[in-house]
Amino acid sequence: MNSKNIKCPVVLSFDIDGTSGLINMDPRTKNFPSLMSMREYGPNIAMPRILKILKKHDIKSSFYIPGFIADTHPELVKNIFYEGHEIGHHGYMHEPPATLTKQEEIDVIDKGIESIERITSQIPLGYRSPSWELSKYSIDILVNKGFVYDSSLMGDDRPYYIQSGKNKLIEIPIHWELDDHPYFNHTPYLNQRNVISNPMSVLESWQLAFEGIFEYQGSFILTLHPWIIGRPGRLKMLEKLILYIKKFDGAEFITALNLAKLFDSQIVSN
Ligand SMILES: [Zn+2]
């Protein structure tokens, strides 16, 4: 990574939730095969296509994977890791931290780390909270477990520090605008009956968001879910977005971990 030439870091991040969040929310969802299959499409069908697209465009991405998904799809996690992408922590069963006690939150972090470490022999250094909310304990727990950054908050459009007492983490911020879920999620079983967006209008929104972030010298951090973005028409849209961003001199696709390191080194050297 030649940091001197990077004017606008671009992170394509993928949360491979699969069925985990649904089962965590309500174990009875396991009895609904259509619902389960809609989510399983993510790791099973969409992921190989996504890896192919990233390879074609020479992009390294960050993948946030619940331990349960790693345990049930170890070959997929291996493939992602050996392609040189970052594997981040995303709970065990996609548990939102604020719904847990402190000890439960520690146990979930440990269990998620173990699942990833078993496959990659490396502990994850990045954390993205399921459902994008932290508890009052999260920063301390993450720092104690050796995490370098969190990616769950919306306080800026470039990295910043978050603190709890003496404990400090880098925040790689996200936003609902730069997430495929609000545009495309349509799950009648859960009474989520959004009108499905036209991918070309989402492309236009994301292109404008990128132009603005480029101008303000921020970081473009996109959150995608394989079960959502992996539908064929939406993958075509993602490729159009990649090609659009590549036209901007100084826009550089990097992992969230490399963005955190870049931010840290710039702060230290300033
Ligand atoms: Zn998730």
Image: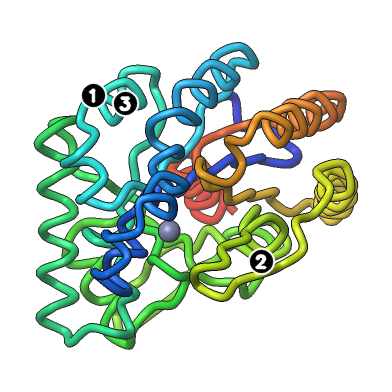
What residue do we see at 48% from left, 49% from top? 260
Give the residue at mark 1.
75
- The picture quadrant for ligand 1 comes to bottom left
Q: Nearer the viewer, residue 193 or 45?
A: 193
Mark 3 lies on a secondary structure that is: helix
Does the beta carbon of the residue at mark 3 sit less than 8 Å from ligand 1?
A: no
Which of discs 1 and 3 lies nearer the camera? The answer is: 1
State the image coordinates of residue 95 (x, y, percent, origin top left): 29, 70
Above or below: residue 169 compared with residue 122: below
Mark 1 lies on a secondary structure that is: helix
Do the CB atoms of the residues marked 1 and 3 lie less than 8 Å apart? no
What residue do we see at 54% from left, 26% from top? 50
**Which comes sooner in the sequence, label 3 or label 2?**
3
**Which comes sooner in the sequence, label 1 or label 3?**
1
Marks 3 and 2, how far apart in space? 27 Å
Q: Amino acid at mark 2?
A: Trp
Q: Amino acid at mark 3?
A: Phe
Does the beta carbon of the residue at mark 2 sit less than 8 Å from ligand 1?
A: no
Marks 1 and 3, how far apart in space? 10 Å
Q: Amino acid at mark 1?
A: Glu
Query: Can residue 5 be seen here?
Result: no
- The image quarter containing residue 247 is top right
Give the residue at mark 2.
176
State the image coordinates of residue 194 (x, y, percent, origin top left): 71, 67
